[in-house]
Image (spheres, rainbow, N blue to C red):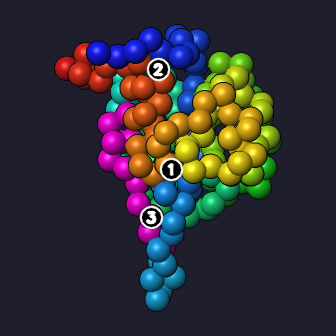
Amino acid sequence: MHKAPLFDLDKISAFIFDFDGVLTNNIVFTDQNGIESVACSRADGLAFDILRRLEKQSYILSTEKNQVVEARANKLKIPVIQGINNKVNALNELKKKEGIDFKSVLYMGNDLNDYGAMQLCGISVCPADSHPKIKEISDIVLKTNGGNGVVRELLEDILGLDFVKILY
């Protein structure tokens, strides 16, 4: 049985997720050829299936410009905005392009480069292992560390979604 949701899903028009430290555990593996790889949770993959089923806009917003970010976004079937210096400027561009109202955006970040973007959006969420200043400004600090199913916790535990009812 699910507890009552902390936020009304109908009032959230878009979900924006940082990549490193949110969808990953913030560790990067680099081989002798400079090829990077990261670990992501498959539990989050199912959570993105739910967001698509509910027709909720979702984006990955990353300062990194890396093939691994794009590969994961493609697998999740969500747009990625990457290689940006300023996330607030990127959000303002997204607002112009998509007509997004920041008050109805949920942003999940973990580090200082997310600070301004999180303050701009209506709901801010962070993983348990986020920077202390990010925890201070977050509406919700999750129990889960980045890369370990944070989107799943958000949807099931915070928003009270029943994946079985939605998917099957």
The first of marks 2 and 3 along the sequence is: 3
Q: Is 11 rendered above or below residue 33?
A: above
Q: Residue at x 42, y 26 (%)?
A: 157
Question: What is the x, y in percent for residue 53?
Answer: 36, 23
Residue placed under numbered mark 2 in the picture = 159
Please give the name of the residue rendered at 71% of the width and 19% of the height, measured from the top-left corner.
103
Q: Earlier in the sequence, mark 1 or mark 2?
A: 1
Return the residue at label 3.
38
Separation (CA) of disc 1 from disc 2? 18 Å
Q: Of 152 and 60, which appears nearest the observer? A: 152
Type of residue at label 2? Leu
Q: Is residue 92 left or right of residue 35?
A: right
Tell me where the magenta segment starts and ends, as one range: 36-48
Q: Which label was assigned to residue 146?
A: 1
Q: Residues within 10 Å of mark 3 (few under 14, many from 20)?
A: some
Tell me if residue 70 can be seen: no
Q: Amino acid at mark 1?
A: Gly
Q: CA distance from mark 3 to mark 1?
A: 12 Å
Q: Can residue 33 be seen in this snapshot?
A: yes
Tag 3 near tag 1, CB within 8 Å: no
**Comparing marks 3 and 1, which lies closer to the viewer?**
1
What SS does tag 2 mark?
A: loop
Q: Residues within 10 Å of mark 2 (few under 14, many from 20)?
A: some
Residue 114 as seen in the image, left or right of residue 9: right
